[in-house]
Amino acid sequence: MNELWNDLNGRPIKDLNNGQIGVVTKGSLTEGVEMKLNPDRSVEDVKAGKFVVIEGYKNQFFSMITDLSLDATNPDILLYPPHDGDQLLHSVLNGASTYVTVALRPMLMLEAGEEVVDEPRPVKTIPSHFSKVVEAEEEDVSRVFGSEDRDDRFFNMGTPLDMDTPVCLNLNRFVERSNGIFGKTGTGKSFLTRLVLCGMIKKKKAVNLIFDMHNEYGFQAMKEGNSGDSFVKGLKQLFGNQVALFSLDPASSRQRGIQPDHEVHIAYDQIAVEDVVALQDELQLNPTASESAYLVAAMYKNKWLRQLLSVEGPDVEKFAEEIGANKSSLSALHRKLKRIEGFPFMVTKLDGADAVDTMMDYIERGIHIVLEFGRQTSMLAYLLVANILSRRIHEQYVKKSEQYYASQNPADKPKQLVITIEEAHKFLNPTTAKQTIFGTIAREMRKYYVSLLVVDQRPSGIDEEVLSQLGTKITALLNDEKDIQSVLTGVSNASGLRSVLASLDSKQQALMFGHAVPMPVVIRTRNYDEEFYRAMGDLTEEEKVVKAEAASAALFGD
Amino acid sequence: MALANVDIEEYIGEVIESSTSQFVAESRELNGAPPFGAFVKTGGVIPVYGLVYNVCTHSIEPNRRATAYGLTEQELRDEQPQIFELLKTEFEAVIVGYGDDRGPRQMLPPQPPGIHRFVLPCAEFEVKALTNNGDFLRCVLSGNRLPADDLIIASVRHAWAARAFDMPYLVGIGKDLCRLIRDDYDRLSSIMRRISQ
């Protein structure tokens, strides 16, 4: 008997009404559309962020659920609600006098039978009264987001809420702009980053340079889990020769069982004043100190840092007088830059190839680079190295692009490069964004074939202009109002997305929106497990043996 | 679908007064009227369907009234059988529809039922057709001099029984009722409570 009541009270009876969950009752273009939930559907099955389709007369409107509310026609009902045992009255009232209103935000409009190719059409109209609203089905998802079978540019990122169909990212559009991955600590940003990087590597859409501050991406990394900690494979393990591991701290890498392909050293002469200016906040230099640096550089050109660090004690003041800088700010500068001497990767003179030249060589060959920091996890080291290397690589890229524009020879076309940086708010906060190479790269978009992949847990620390330049954003749970607001900067119809962002699960759920997806969508991220490894082309030991045997048989005959 | 010939053996009453919206019939046997809230129909080529809303028993002569004897019914039948000849039972029904060649229709008939037509109980399929949705409730609520609440309860219980006490049907009728008397939540909850008792 109880089950009968449950069905009447709204446990969904899937066979009824062909998956229809309601009809459109009210709405406007600017504020979204409202629908009345069918009484046979339970409100608890309808979640914010769910993907539904409104079947209009000529068009189908692909929408996301943004809000739910309970209403009653008669306030008396709320004053004297039915007793707990009075199931009949409860069922009678459900849907007739008490009902659920669901707010929907149409994101995308397609004519019947149309598929999204590259540019989705914005929503210019709304569905009429009483248009049917149905749950999205597999076909709808693959029509809108594409599928890996259809085309090479689509990469499966996960599934929508309560569905099993894959939701794909359009990688061509993804690499056209700089992008961001955001989320509170522990929400799985590293996994999201790995997914995206694997996608770009597997589908060969761009060459990646990853500044791996916490040694997570190169080789294996720890995974937090219920069944104790386990290890997940890194990019080098999955893609073998397509990925090169550079290390700033080779001893640490070797201790973790990894032989880096290259060791990175930086000579003092390679550090320009801009690189130090980028460290302003970290070193707490005031602007006068930076000015002093310029003055030293004016006199000593690229030997300025060596010269500055070589003076000691009272000589610093004399040195200041020589170049006409303010004594106290120069001393401050000197004191703080002394820390750089302590880094083991800093050398006076380079022996062996310049790290940047090697990197450029790899990049030109299409080999991806993961730069590990080993034990050099201090913010200063990270900022310094990332800035220096990126700046120089960018310089080279500018040269190559201009050469290509001049010659128009397809052989000269530089390979699209994506630079991944973590803790991005240290690089791209409002003060440094205007002065560092990363701000420049973010603003330039695709002019010089370099773009950023920004990973951060504090998007409110990132300059607004940069945030609005990010093409696609993949966001896991964010709590802070300021963070949510920053992430939604420059997004139209942000109000609906706000509530969706705040209601994400703390693990394995993310909201993707922007250039590379036709409409914002909440996904349950793809599992990073054996199945994924296999999909990326990584074989198990037995399979490798079989493959090797097959290869040798092919080569040498039986 | 034309009605089969009326089987005289089964009739329960005879129309003695009729109008477009209701009719009065004398029941065939004393105290043998159809129950309050039952669905009945008049015979003939175009049957007219009614819902019994009043049953009364009184003397056949308007000026004479029955008086008390202080005897049980069995004793009365033995000693004074003639008094039973002087009483009659009548029932009044509000018209809820009529039948044409497509089956029962929930509208007032073009012509009222003829006087002296026989009245029969409705078959189960007819009851179901007449109570398929909440429209018959509207008839009940808009009638005058009807005991609306009790009539609703009785007629819905009959309709529910005709459907073997199918709960979803009851919920559906409840929702239709809710729309009709939405402003009076107390009345609705009282009716629903008594229906399901």
Image (tube, coloured by chain):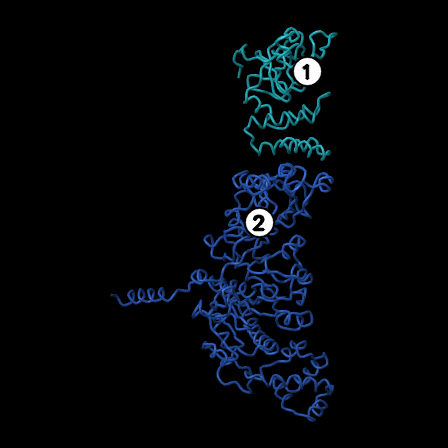
Chain colours: A blue, B cyan
Q: Secondary structure at mark 1?
A: strand
Pointers 2 and 1 in contact (CB under 8 A)? no
Q: Secondary structure at mark 2?
A: strand
Q: Please tell me the numbered disc located at residue A51.
A: 2
Crowding at label 2, few (<14), some or many (≥20) Cα neighbours within 10 Å?
A: many
The residue closer to the viewer here, B32 or A169, is B32
Q: Which residue is mark 1?
A: B56
Tag 1 subunit: B
Q: Position of residue B178 (x, y in %)?
A: 67, 33
The residue closer to the viewer here, A478 or B179, is B179
- Mark 2 → mark 1, Cα distance in angstroms: 62 Å
Q: Amino acid at mark 1?
A: Cys
- Residue at the left extreme of this rendering: A558
Q: Which quadrant of the view contains residue B57?
A: top right
The residue closer to the viewer here, B89 or A478, is B89
Q: Please tell me the numbered disc located at residue A500.
A: none
Residue found 57% across the figure and 74% down from its top: A390
